[in-house]
């Protein structure tokens, strides 16, 4: 018979990793098993966030996972260049994997692909069956006909340079580049005086992105800035879901009584696609209430995710304006106008905590897209919405 686990976490990505990390801090005696199909936890990712995205307490318990921290960040648009205040932080998959391995020890099983997941059991690909009071499925986003989504698709490359790059803080968006038929920007993190992570990022209608074209874009961007590339350290690719509309309960229905986390549970910022703040909040919520059986845990996560969905309604409306109103290569004007607003409002936007006055401020004034098309997008009465289904 297998060990009687309190919790099995299927998938060692960000959301499940933070749940395990927080549970071991709050309830170290719980029997927790984490299963990962790949060779190590965390995959090949860089997760970044603003310090104001989290509570001070969350920043404290996450601190050992943070690999890089900067003060302030830059944005660049054709008609706006600005430096914004506040801490910006990154967790690397390398740091994340090492921390989980140290914390979980043999209770982190890698190279362990899963064949079947149920609320209280897991069957591995080799036939081994494991049982627990509850199982959380955190294996990433699942496509659904009940959500209308675009994507933030990117190719990122970490380079070691022959000479210092001269940057002192991240550039979150450089949209002065050729838009290439949609909203495009380059994202840059200075990891050391001679090392950079650069991502070619596109807000696109479908998940597909020409990786070779993105790589060529990155080479041209580096050459234009005089950065002498010496060695490619690593490359990462991704497509984050950006929600325009949907039926949350229908999206969740296939899970039934199955606890889930992260993107699989629909827990991500509708406009940025980032999931770290909600993952940290869910980890806190679970750590406060465990141990729980599968039904109670599933209900807890359902309530949490349903509340998050309601709170993201305004962001879904903004996404429709971004994707559906105006020409694709003019989408940058929406973000250019946004980044001219109050710095506190921008911070609350990223944290998903806009006040009513913030929402009014975002909407008032001359719109950066045609008024009629914006109204149709807001009211979901544009035929273009059907193109995303």
Image: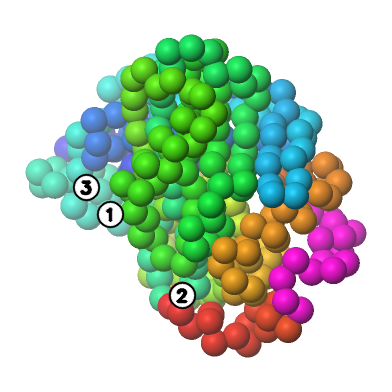
Q: Earlier in the sequence, mark 2 or mark 3?
A: 3
The span picked out in magenta is: 354-371
In front here: 214 or 15? 214
C-alpha gap between disc 2 and disc 3: 31 Å
Q: Which mark is residue 114?
A: 3
Across and down, in percent, residue 369 comes to: 71, 71
Instruction: Report whether 388 appears left or right of 43.
Output: right
In front here: 306 or 331? 331
Q: Residue furthest left?
A: 126
Res 386 seen here: yes
Query: From the viewer's perspective, is residue 359 above or below residue 386?
Result: above
Quadrant (top left, top right, bottom left, bottom right) of the N terminus: top left
C-alpha gap between disc 3 and disc 1: 7 Å
Residue 367 in magenta stretch: yes
Across and down, in percent, residue 114 comes to: 21, 47
Q: Earlier in the sequence, mark 1 or mark 2?
A: 1
Across and down, in percent, residue 335 comes to: 69, 55
Q: Which mark is residue 388?
A: 2
Is there CB contact under 8 Å for labels 3 and 1? yes
In percent of the image, x 53 and y 82: which residue is there? 384
Quadrant (top left, top right, bottom left, bottom right) of the C terminus: bottom left
In percent of the image, x 54 and y 74: which residue is there? 246
């Amino acid at each position: 018979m297998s060990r009687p686990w309190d919790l099995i976490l299927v998938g060692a990505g960000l959301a499940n990793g933070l749940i395990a990390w927080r549970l071991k801090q709050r309830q170290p005696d719980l029997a927790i098993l984490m299963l990962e199909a790949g060779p190590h936890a965390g995959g090949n990712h860089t997760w970044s966030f603003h310090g104001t995205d989290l509570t001070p307490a969350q920043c404290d318990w996450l601190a050992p996972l943070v690999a890089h921290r900067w003060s302030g960040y830059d944005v660049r648009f054709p008609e706006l260049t600005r430096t914004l205040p506040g801490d910006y932080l990154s967790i690397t998959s390398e740091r994340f994997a090492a921390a989980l391995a140290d914390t979980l020890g043999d209770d982190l099983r890698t190279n362990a692909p899963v064949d079947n997941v149920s609320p209280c059991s897991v069957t591995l690909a080799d036939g081994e069956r494991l049982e627990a009071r509850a199982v959380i499925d955190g294996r990433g986003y699942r496509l659904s006909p009940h959500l209308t989504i675009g994507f933030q698709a990117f190719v990122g490359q970490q380079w070691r340079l022959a000479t210092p790059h001269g940057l002192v803080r991240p550039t979150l968006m450089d949209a002065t580049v050729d838009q290439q038929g949609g909203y495009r920007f380059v994202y840059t993190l200075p990891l050391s005086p001679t090392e950079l992570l650069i991502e070619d990022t596109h807000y696109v209608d479908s998940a597909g992105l020409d990786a070779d074209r993105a790589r060529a874009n990155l080479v041209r961007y580096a050459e234009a800035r005089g950065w002498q590339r010496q060695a490619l350290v690593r490359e990462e690719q991704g497509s984050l879901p950006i929600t325009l509309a949907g039926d949350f309960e229908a999206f969740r229905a296939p899970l039934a009584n199955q606890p889930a986390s992260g993107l699989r549970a629909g827990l991500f910022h509708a406009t940025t696609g980032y999931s770290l703040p909600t993952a940290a909040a869910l980890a806190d919520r679970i750590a406060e209430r465990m141990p729980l059986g599968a039904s109670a845990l599933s209900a807890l996560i359902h309530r949490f995710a349903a509340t998050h969905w309601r709170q993201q309604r305004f962001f879904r409306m903004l996404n429709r304006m971004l994707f559906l109103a105006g020409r694709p290569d003019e989408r940058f004007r929406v973000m250019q106008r946004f980044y001219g607003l109050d710095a506190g409002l921008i911070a609350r936007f990223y944290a998903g905590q806009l006040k009513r006055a913030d929402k009014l401020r975002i909407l008032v004034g001359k719109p950066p897209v045609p008024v009629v098309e914006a109204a149709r997008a807001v009211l979901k009465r544009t035929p273009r919405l059907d193109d995303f289904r």
